[in-house]
Amino acid sequence: MDTDGQDLAAMLYGRRDLRIEHIERGDVGPDQVRVEMHGVSLCGSDLHYYADGRNGSNTLTQPTVLGHEGFGRIVEVGADINADRVGDRVAVEPTVPAPHSPLGLRGHYNVDPSVVCFGSPPNNGLLRGSVVMPAAFAHSLPDAVTDDVAALIEPLAVATWAVSRAGSVLGKRILITGAGPIGLLVLQTVLALGAREVTITDVSQARLDAAVELGATTAVLSGGDAIEFGPADTAFDCSGNPGAIAAAARSLGPAGVLALVGVPGRQEAEFPISLVQRWELDIRGCFRYGPDAFAQAIGLAARGRVDLHSLVTSRYPLSESAAALEAALSDPTQLKIVIETAAQNSEEDR
């Protein structure tokens, strides 16, 4: 961190216009902590903002620091926070609701309209030297979750929340459409929680190979002729592709559950609604993460029930953030790219 009250940050000004520059650090208020960022992994939303200037309906309207999957170390605490937290290694939960929001008080803060998400324009993200945030959303990490994978706790929390939304998977047949990082984390989570067999589909053979290495029972290359799956007890769509969502629904047996995890590429899509009615299928939306998702993710990672190391395929310094984003966009073999922020800012201090 810079001693002049500024940090280096990766600021997006427009499509493929990412600049490394200094920004103000800000002050730590009551109930807040300052987290010195050590690592940030790239998400699909970061790629959309960088390449297109938008992600879904949200558009880049002013320069914004990217990144929301991160970890670091608490270096400063507010007046109401125990000073013993200084030095804690933490995973950042990047979505923060307004205090005492009605939905939040009912345990649904992830879908509260008041939520502010780091790295979702116009809110600055984590690709910077430090971030000031509510102490309750800085989750302490045990030593068993090592620095090289700690940034992946956030996407793992997406997976644990999706599986929680779908209900028990113990002894069940599971279908996952989409073998990107979230699909591979859902795969590992359902296996850790006792799924009997797991079929996974994707358009990338490299990602299917990774899925088999991580324990998938069957891996199917999609994108060609229609393939019938099933009957599955529970299906997770982690692609957002309308065709994959429809295929997942058709794979389900009576009283099956379809969890929608991937972000759809368009608002409207054809869907076999007659099957939903005939077989009393449950369709469950999954948005980010709710209560206990980070605790579950940290527990799975700490006990070695999921392999996060296999998902980290490249590392870049903060100064090469644009190159990292270009690699993620152009190389289908990349799963998770981690940008290491702490070393860059330490060099600036000297």
Image (cartoon, rainbow, N blue to C red):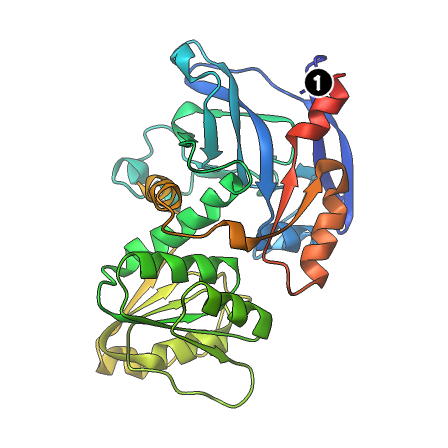
Q: Position of residue 13 (x, y in %)?
A: 75, 42
101 or 298, which is in the foreground?
298
Horizontal arrangement in the rendering, residue 72 relative to residue 164 (left or right):
right
Residue 8 in view here:
no
Q: How many marks?
A: 1
23 versus 243 height, above or below: above
344 or 246, which is in the foreground?
344
Q: Where does the C terminus fall, quadrant-wise?
A: top right
Residue visible at 65% across and 54% down in the picture: 47
Q: Amino acid under label 1? A: Asp
Q: Secondary structure at mark 1?
A: loop
Q: Which residue is mark 1?
A: 2
Residue visible at 44% across and 63% down in the picture: 214
Q: How would you rate the neighbour count of disc 1 (Cα within 10 Å): few for under 14, some for 14-19, many for 20 or more?
A: some
Residue 322 in view here:
yes
Horizontal arrangement in the rendering, residue 206 relative to residue 5 (left or right):
left
Residue visible at 70% across and 51% down in the picture: 325
Residue visible at 35% across and 82% down in the picture: 250
223 versus 14 height, above or below: below
Q: Position of residue 256 (x, y in %)?
A: 25, 73
Q: Position of residue 84 (x, y in %)?
A: 40, 13
Q: Position of residue 1 (x, y in %)?
A: 67, 20
143 versus 190 height, above or below: above
Horizontal arrangement in the rendering, residue 215 relative to residue 29 (left or right):
left
